Each structure stands twice: as C-alpha cells, then as structure tokens.
Amino acid sequence: MIPVTRAPKPEVLVRNAERWQAALLAASTEAARKRAESKYRHPQVRDALQEMFHGKCAYCESKIDHVDYGNIEHYRPKRGRHGRPDLTFAWSNLLWACGKCNGPECKADQFPEIADGGPLVNPCDDDPAQHFEFTYDPVSRVASVYGRTERGRVSEAVLGLNRRDLRSYRSVQVRKLLALAHFALSDPEAAELLQQAQDADAEYAAFARVLLQEFCRGAPP
C-alpha cells in the first residue's frame, strides 16, 4: 500500500450524489434500495477511481485491469454491523480494490472501529509506511507486510495482505527486483527499470521503495 492523492470528484457525483443519496435513504423496498444504490457504479466513477489508483488495488497494490474488472470499494461499508449507507455516494469513501481484498474472505463488510484496533489504513488519508513494514526474507524468499501499529496489524489481518496466493506472487516480483538491483550500478536500462518499479503505477511499489533504498545503502535485503 502506498499513499494516493485523491482526484477531484467526478462531475456525475457533483451533479447527482445528493439526489441519489436521498433516493437511497427513502427506498421502502429491497428492490428500490438496490436500484438506488447501484448508481455509484456509474462509468465516470469507475473510470476516475481506476485512473486515480493506476489500475491497482488500493490495498494490496496488485494490478487488476488485465485480469478482472475491479471493485468500487466503500472504505466504510454500505451494510453490515458498521454499515454507513449515508456514505454510499461520498467520493471520500470510495476506493478501487481487487475482488480478493474486497471479497468475503477478506474485508467485505468488515470495518473495525477504534475499540477494535481500527479504523483500517486508508491510502488516501494515511501514510501506509507509518503503519506497515514491507519486508523480504532472503532465507525463505518471502515478501511480507507486517503491521507497525495496531491499525496496521488489524488492517493486514482484515485485508489479507499476507494471504497465500498474494504473498507467493508478490515474493516472485520482489525477488526479480532485487536481482535486477545487482545490475543497476553498471547497466542504465536496469537502473531505469528499478526507478520505474518505485513509480505509483507499478505493482508493489511500496516494496520497491523500501527494499531498493536498503539495497542502495548497502543493507541486506
């Protein structure tokens, strides 16, 4: 997870959010509620979020677009124990997420409050580096996310940031970066690729930024 600057609110929300919200809160049947709620999936909203997060999941930083459609994620869920239907169309409450982080085995409608170690780390409002450690173990060759703070630890658990499939794929990408770093001092193309790996649109940029800084300082990865 890396910091993300929130883009301006899409015009469709500027024009319609209040009206859509009123219709949702006034809905008297489940069918009417679903019709009203679905407005947040407007293409302008999807496109704005997709661009803002560079096609990556706000939480795990995996690229989504080439394998899935992506989820418009409500940071504070619409439903559930801590549901906030009044924030359904709030631009400040919307993120872009993969189906795994936002799925039933991870976040779904969960939202730990302060008493439960929350709230979850939000890349648009928080500096993730203050809450997470992005580490690589050269013995096990595994790239892991660990909480520095209670919020970080709770977020890691709720979002499944070390789930097996994610950690396995992520570890391979981080190993490639570290191997590439050995050539960067003498190979300009390798150096350019390493720089690009730290860009906001690169997968697992948080790992690249931390581990490559350590490598350049001469510390073990």
Image: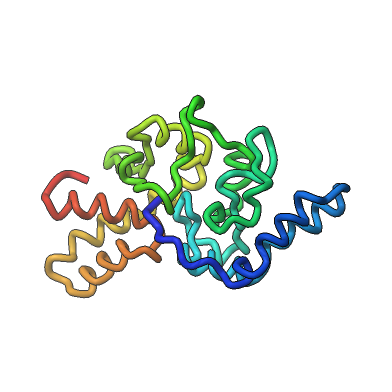
Image side of residue 50 versus residue 21, left or right: left
Image position, residue 71 (x, y; %): 61, 57
Image vertical order of residue 122 relative to residue 13, above or below: above
Q: Nearer the viewer, residue 56 or 143?
A: 56
Image position, residue 55 (x, y; %): 50, 65
Image side of residue 12 versus residue 1, left or right: right
Image position, residue 131 (x, y; %): 35, 39
Q: How is the image coloured?
A: rainbow
Occupied quadrant, residue 178? bottom left
Q: What residue is drawn where x is 72% and y is 62%?
A: 19
Q: What residue is drawn where x is 58% and y is 44%?
A: 76
Q: What residue is drawn where x is 58% and y is 63%?
A: 67
Image position, residue 195 (x, y; %): 25, 66
Residue that lies at the very extreme toward the top in this rendered image: 115
Q: How many marks?
A: 0
